[in-house]
Structure formats: C-alpha cells, structure tokens
Image (tube, helix red, strand yellow):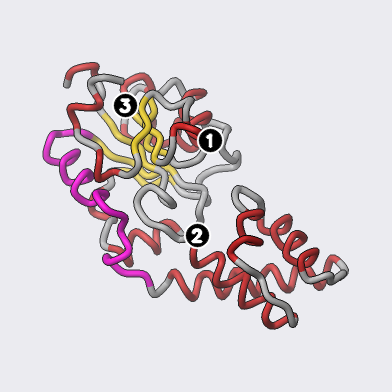
Amino acid sequence: MTNSIQACLFDLDGVLVDTAKYHFLAWKRLAAELGFTFTEQDNEKLKGVSRMASLDILLKVGGIELNGTQKQELAERKNEWYVEYISQMDASEILPGALAFLQQCRENGLKTALGSASKNAPMILRNTGLTPYFDAIIDGTHTSQAKPDPEVFLLGARELGVNPENCVVFEDAEAGIEAAKRAGMRCVGIGTPETLGAAGLVIPSLESMTLSMIKKL
C-alpha cells in the first residue's frame, strides 16, 4: 500500500466503543450510596485521572474524609459496578463507522491490533463481537507502562510482525497521540483539532475515515 502502511492499531475507549458513561454511572452510584449527588459536570474533572485520584475528587465533592482502607474498599466497589455494566455491552454500542473501517482494513490486507490500557478490553471486544477483527490484542494485562509511554503500541507492532514506521495509530486522547509518536508511528486523532492537534490527521469519528486518507499521513 502507498506510504507503506501495513498495520492499523486502535485504542478502545472513545475510538471503537464508549465506556466512559459506565464509569460515570458507577461513580454516581457510589456518591448516592454516600449520600450526595455526583453530576456530569463533576465527572468532567475525572477525565484521564486514575481510579484512586478520581475517588479523592468525588469525596471532595461530597465533603467526605476517609482513611486509606475505606478508600480502597470504595474504589473496588466502584470497579465491580463498572465491570457489571460493561459485561452487558453488545454490538449496538460500537461507535459509528468503527466496524465498517475495521472491515475495510481486513479486506485490504492491513493487519490490525488493539492497544488499550483497559484490563477489561477482551471482555468488551467479546461482548460487542469485535474480537475477530484483530490480529493482536494488547491490553492492560500485557503492559507495565501507561500512555504516553509507547510500550502498548510497540508491543502491538511486534505481535503483528510490522515495523513501527509502517503502523498508523487511532487514538482519542492526547497521551495516546504522544505514545504513538514516541513509538515512531503515524497517528490519527479521533476528536477535535483543539485537543488532538499533534496527530497527523484529526477526524470526528471513524465514520469519516477511509483507507485513501491514510496515504496522506
């Protein structure tokens, strides 16, 4: 293929599916149990923040102070609820254009890999029926470094047997774009140019993506 792209690597959340709403539902449920309301506006403060740091923000909203053991218990309860929600996902939750673009990649001989920090990625792929569209799945159980470290994408390229310079990454987060660039790969941002301007190309969703656009990267 022109520009020697041989593989496409995809982040999961915000690119292929949207699980952010389930994180919000789980945090909201936890807040309700603690006796206060957690709004979507409050939830904005949690984007890109670790689970324990998110819990600290939530407790601050509710004006609640707890010790380390109590916090750990709450964080685990929140995660159990989140897993309960995503275990009920199905193919209707695949984001617009994602399945069609994955099919295009396969039909045109491009290799595909998932590169996600989520340890729940295999279950989400299974429940949505996306598993067969990937030659390699690198999730949170395979990596020791979080994005913007390039580890997840370099492992994906190695698993596919493709050099990093022959890969293009699809990402919706700044840290993911940086990870792709540090891996020496080309990158397409899914979102807005304001936040993802460092990507070689920015599109609103995979619905806007065609294989011919890869040639311009």
Looking at the rendering, in which quadrant would you find the C terminus?
A: top left
Residue at the image position 62 percent from the left and 68 percent from the top: 39
Of tags 2 and 3, the one toward the viewer is 2
Mark 3, secondary structure of its residue:
loop
Kindly give the residue lying farthest to the left in the view shown: 107
Q: Mark on residue 166?
A: none
Question: Distance of mark 2 from mark 1, alpha carbons?
Answer: 16 Å
The disc, 2 or 1, on the residue closer to the chain's N-terminal end is 2
Q: Mark on residue 162?
A: 3
**Other-residue count near label 1 (Cα within 10 Å), few / some / many at <14 / 14–19 / ≥20:** some
Direction from residue 112 to residue 85 in the image, left or right = right
Q: Amino acid at mark 3?
A: Val
Q: Amino acid at mark 2?
A: Ala
Direction from residue 94 to residue 50 in the image, left or right = right
Residue 138 % position (x, y): 43, 45
The magenta stretch spans which residues?
89-110
**Other-residue count near label 2 (Cα within 10 Å), few / some / many at <14 / 14–19 / ≥20:** few
In this rendering, is residue 180 above or below 144?
above
Nearest the eye: 188 or 79: 188
User: For mark 1, what is the residue?
Assistant: 174
Residue 190 % position (x, y): 39, 40
Looking at the rendering, in which quadrant would you find the N terminus?
A: top left
Residue at the image position 46 percent from the left and 49 percent from the top: 139
Q: Quadrant of residue 102?
A: top left
Mark 2, secondary structure of its residue:
helix
Direction from residue 208 to residue 151 in the image, left or right = right
Question: Distance of mark 2 from mark 3, alpha carbons?
Answer: 31 Å
The disc, 2 or 3, on the residue closer to the chain's N-terminal end is 2
Q: Mark on residue 20?
A: 2
Nearest the eye: 14 or 126: 14
Question: Distance of mark 3 from mark 1, alpha carbons?
Answer: 24 Å
Q: Quadrant of residue 19?
A: bottom left
